[in-house]
Image (cartoon, rainbow, N blue to C red):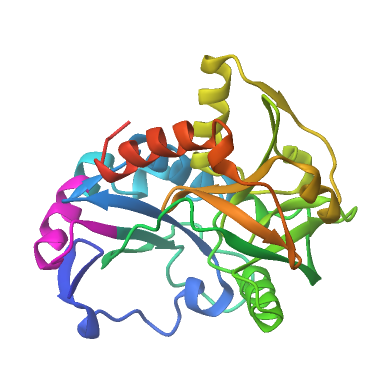
Amino acid sequence: MQVWMNGRFYDQDKAVIPVTDRGFLLGDGFFETMRAHKGNIAWLAAHMERLARHADVLKLPTDLLPDAEDVASIVQTLFAEVRDDDAIVRLTVSRGSGERGLLPPSKPKPTILISVTPFVPVDPNMGLSLCTSQKIRRNAWSVAGSIKSLNYLDNIAAKQEVTSYGGDDAIILSSDGDVAETSVANIFGIQGETLWTPDERTGILCGLARSYVLEWAEKSGVDVKFSSKKPEMLREFDAVFTANALQGLRAVGKVDGEKVGVPAKTFFTELALKMGVSLCNGIVI
């Protein structure tokens, strides 16, 4: 498989970064993961806008980033080696090399890597088993938590922890002990005709799929509630589901070993199908 890095295509085992790269040494960088179908990236414009916001947070000049047209062209080339219709595109940005110490160089030369990996979409109705992490909490004031930072240690630790409990993914709590998100997705609950999701002030990374769901709810006249919930309160919903830009929506079958509602009996099915069509068709929005 090939990758694209800093303007050139390489065999992935020949693409190297210098030992002075700040992304490698300090986690000084960010990334985007995107869904592609037959070479077309879904939600490309939205992903590129978020990439620029990440750069602004880290005070990295956005004119150093590739534009959407370049990314689309690069992915089309890389997709030639993908035998499946669906793939994950990862665009990784490191600030690049610098002198020793915390302060970044005044004129950064970022390391930018684009890779494509085959991906098999998951049936949204296959229920996830979520377990609450007892070790990790979201910090609403964290810079790293507000972007898709190269430092993913909290998410890794939470996933390792709940895997030992037999869970598929972790429920990560806010600093106040309320439900925030999973290690890779945002969380939603359905009660009757009302949709619930944690407030941004819990320290969550507000994903593009979350925005998609909230926009759909507004257009469909679905009432949305943002309120604090303890993990055990998720079992009171008619249904619980997660949302991210790779897998779309995923039904939750269990929370901390206890069964939760069945999404097929709610508007989840309609929404999951609509989002699935958008992602699987590689629609560029």
* Residue 205 highlighted magenta (yes or no): no
**Relative to residue 64, is residue 7 depicted above or below?**
below
Residue at 63%, 57% (x, y): give it.
253
Q: In this figure, what is the number of numbered marks?
A: 0
Residue at 22%, 79% (x, y): give it.
12
Question: How far across and down, in percent of the image, does residue 115 sit?
Answer: 28, 65
**Relative to residue 134, is residue 146 depicted above or below?**
above
Question: How far across and down, in percent of the image, does residue 180 sit?
Answer: 74, 51
Judge from the rendering whether residue 75 lies leftward or rightward of residue 250; answer left or right: left
Question: How far across and down, in percent of the image, does residue 105 sit?
Answer: 51, 63
Judge from the rendering whether residue 279 lies leftward or rightward of residue 125; answer left or right: left
Which picture quadrant has residue 265?
Answer: top right
Residue at 54%, 56% (x, y): give it.
148
Looking at this view, name the residue that lies furthest to the right.
Answer: 176
Residue at 53%, 36% (x, y): give it.
268
Please tell me which residue lies in front, 220 or 199. 220
Please tell me which residue lies in front, 65 or 213. 213
User: Can you see residue 113?
Assistant: yes
User: Can you see residue 44?
Assistant: no
**Relative to residue 131, is residue 75 depicted above or below?**
above
**Relative to residue 89, is residue 72 depicted above or below?**
above
Considering the whole magenta stretch, tell me its main secondary structure.
helix
Quadrant where the N terminus is found in the figure: bottom left
Question: How far across and down, in percent of the image, does residue 173 sit?
Answer: 79, 57
* Residue 83 highlighted magenta (yes or no): yes
Q: Which residues are magenta?
A: 72-87
Please tell me which residue lies in front, 114 or 5. 114
Quadrant where the C terminus is found in the figure: top left
